[in-house]
Image (cartoon, rainbow, N blue to C red):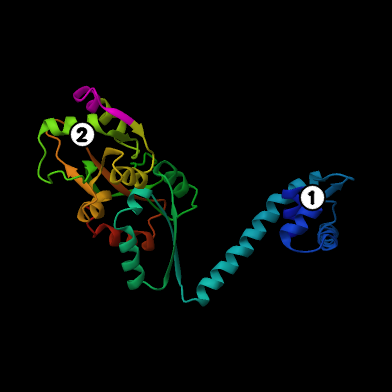
Amino acid sequence: MKTFVTVAETGNFRKASERLYVSQPTVTVHVKSLEKELGVTLFERGKRFVRLTEEGRVYLPHARQLLKLHQDGLNNIQSYTQGYRKSLKLAISPLIADTIMPFVLKKYLEENPEVEISVEIMESNQIEQAVLKEDVDLGFTLLETRQSLLHQEKLYDDPVVFCVPHDGLDAEIAPAFEVEQLLEEYYLLTHNHPVYWDSLLTLIKATYPKTKTMKVSQNHITKRFIISGLGVSFLPKSTIRREVLEGRILQIETPHLNLPNVSAYAVTKYHHSLEVDFTQFVSQFHFQ
């Protein structure tokens, strides 16, 4: 069955044999054996092509499902033999993963060694669909869901702060003219968060019209650019905690800008005990 699916995907017996690390005659034998068992012809064979018959197209999705079930069974039995009794698939926004989430995960696994956790880093606008399609059990996102099928719990609120290079500046509250000077001197690195940038940028340009901007979509790259002296930005306070403590980024007050707060959410499709317990465990930590 695996050989059949591979030939269908490659459209070539030789390429299928290379992908499967078997000989080309072995591929032919496997396909003929499956055809004999099913009582149908799965491929049309030409001198320069191999393509699915109508029967082959009908059977292909079933073969893929059977292979997935087989692989899931292998994964489950391997997890069981390693001592795992429960599994939890997480999707985490990069900005949330960049806070104390690694510490939280480590702490949780120390207290719950029987739980196997897999983590996929995913942008917030993709997490809702991943939870809906049950690709993951639990999503940690920066976007509030509108889906009635999903359960949502707010984890924390996070103030947005003005972040600048730590270049001999006074760590005390900067006067308003210094904020204007910084926005003129450096590029303002924007759109590293999915929620607040459009409205905030309108406010900034109305207050400081000489501001130069540069779009940088990733939070960790934004921080690297700030540290290197390329620009300044407005970031959630939780994401710069380490850099501020290490003296690599400076947080500056902005008297003439009313900066927003942003939130983080846990999103699930089912209210199962494992997802609920993990969400409660995460919510007890302070992310700021």
Q: Is residue 211 magenta?
A: yes
Asked whether, in this view, residue 158 is left or right of residue 194, the answer is left
Asked whether, in this view, residue 168 is left or right of residue 218, the answer is left
Q: How crowded is mark 1: few (under 14 residues within 10 Å), some or many (20 or more)?
A: some
Given residues 224 and 259, the one toward you in this image is 224
Residue 8 spot, x, y in % from top left: 75, 50
Q: Can residue 14 be seen in this view?
A: yes
Q: Give the range drawn in magenta.
A: 203-213
**Residue designated by label 2:** 182
Q: Are marks 2 and 1 in contact (CB under 8 Å)?
A: no
What element does badge 2 sit on?
A: helix
Q: Does the magenta stretch include residue 73?
A: no
The residue that appears at 74% across and 49% down in the rendered structure is 10
Residue 138 spot, x, y in % from top left: 40, 54
The picture quadrant where one finds residue 37 is bottom right
Mark 2 or mark 1, whichever is nearer to me: 2
What element does badge 1 sit on?
A: loop
**Residue designated by label 1:** 12
Given residues 136 and 208, the one toward you in this image is 208
